[in-house]
Amino acid sequence: MTTQTIKMFDLTPGKLLNKLSGYAKEQADNFNLQQTLKSILVPGIAFIIFLVIWGASASQVQTSLGTLPGPVKVWQQAMVLIDEHNEERVKEERFYERQEKRNAKKLLEDPTAKVKIRSYTGKPTFFDQIWTSLLTVATGFLIASLIAIPIGIISGLSPILYGALNPLIQIFKPVSPLAWLPIVTIIVSAVYVSQDPMFSKSYLTSAITVTLCCLWPTIINTTVGVSNISKDLLNVSQVLRLGWWTKIYKIVIPSSIPMMFAGLRVSLGIGWMVLIAAEMLAQNPGLGKFVWDEFQNGSSNSLARIMVAVFAIGFVGFMLDRLMLMLQKKVSWDKSAVLR
Amino acid sequence: MSNEHLMLSQVSIEFPTPNGLFKALENINLNIKQGEFVSLIGHSGCGKSTVLNIVAGLYEATTGGVILDNKEVNEPGPERAVVFQNHSLLPWLTAYENVELAVKQVFKREKSKVEMAEWVEHNLSLVHMEHAMHKRPDEISGGMKQRVGIARALAMEPKVMLMDEPFGALDALTRAHMQDSLIEIQARLNNTVIMITHDVDESVLLSDRIVMMTNGPAATIGEILEIDLPRPRNRVELADNPQYNHYRAEVLKFLYERQHRPEGGAEKKSESGNITSIGKAKTKAA
């Protein structure tokens, strides 16, 4: 280092500058390396400490189903669930193969024969259940957003409408999904009567319950976002005599997108939490039902399997939030804004 | 009187407050000719912006009214384009798109797509922004944003251009550049302009007439000063011009000797009735 410094003195200014910038770059690379190490190492260490504490304390708790499972047991059960899923897939494939052969044979013997194609009816695996849950929450969330965003925009623009809706919003916002569920169940079974139902009732009940709980944060945040649009921009829209629709999509929506997405993210988070409870009670074949079934099952592996579900629920919830963040980044005009 | 371009007659405005009505303006009478550049000057809070907003149609006068080309002003519209103090460009649109929004709105029937594109570019080149047309407001400087704001207003081909302290937020050098640009544009287009300012040099340099306002509440026009300097005006040459300096001194005297205290509303009332003849410099003390 010292020899380098001395050497610098007999360099021409241009070379010196090059040398210096090279040095700075090296420093920056080092810094980046340190940053990445930090960003991986610190959470990693925290996670290991968590696992150790969990493993040590879990073995101390005796339950009717044996000791509380530690990380190792939960990991094993996760593997078992993956294996079960793969086996089920293989079974399903075989089933369809057999069916195809049978049908081909039938047609060969008698070309006019009616061929029956049945779908596989094996029990849903853990991953099927995650998929069902995702589909249900997506449905509920989508319906909620389609209702909440327009209401939010209109009540943000009109103080009178806001005054009218606000008490209703404030009353319904804190209602637990468990209170909605019985009402929704009764209404769905009364209204949704069909010989050949496209959706199962449990799916509809869960999705609608999610909708009812997802509405409020989006409505409130969109309203606040819209009512905080800069007065100057609204003046511009008046001077230009923009039509109602042009004003909405040129001025109102772009400027309230950050708040709108804040609301949507809270809504989706709530929706995912609500869904698990709704599925438990409505018996929609998703993660909630998985947890409930394992709880009822009460085998020595149940607790570990429920914990796998807990981690899966947490991970999916986290991914859903990241997904919304990505969507926000894509839609937002202000690419430089820091989103977290 | 009917051949006047823009007429403000007996305009006063009251705002409701928790303590009752607040009279911001009283008995504003002003006639403006086609192609005239008028600046409104006065201390902050005297209601200059309120006058402008009434002409723009954003506020409604409590009594009296504004008539533009024999039509009463009762709502905002592009024939009275506004250049806002803080540029008010839509931050999610580029400079080009900001001007385009106005052009599409105003000329959607008269111009074809190609003509509209040309018109947008023409107006941006008037304010020397052709190099940064496709940048968004957060990527350009404050002066450039205001240039785009002016281009947007010009592109509407307004009958009157209303400028609300357009250069107030800019540094002195940029402001001088912008004033020169405005002189240049004004020489080409000869628009009717009402500009609010609190910069004495700016008002003398740019205006045909300076309307000096008394302090509020119930502010009104104190004096009107006719600026009879030949155009094109050059700030460097004018610096030594005795006439220019006389005008400057007149405005300064009004602002700092007669209007320096917010009180004095009682005398204003008696004087406001006398402002009927237009175009003559009035020298009336508050």
Image (cartoon, helix red, strand yellow):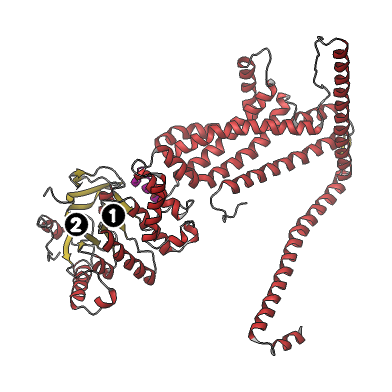
Residue A122: x %, y % from top left: 84, 23
Whether residue B237 is visible, yes or no, is yes
Q: Nearer the viewer, mark 1 or mark 2?
A: 1
Residue at position x 64%, y 35% from top? A271
Q: Main secondary structure of the magenta part?
A: helix
The residue tagged 1 is B161
Task: Specify the quadrant that holds the N terminus of chain A.
Answer: bottom right
- Residues at badges 1 and 2 in contact (C-beta under 8 Å)? no
Residue topped by disc 2: B220
Residue type highlighted by circle 1: Met
Q: Position of residue A10 (x, y in %)?
A: 70, 90
Tell me the residue at 24%/76% (across/down). Answer: B238
Query: Bounds of the magenta span?
Result: A232-241
Q: Chain of mark 1?
A: B
Towards the viewer: A48 or B72? B72
Measuring from the top left, give residue A135's x and y in whole percent: 69, 31
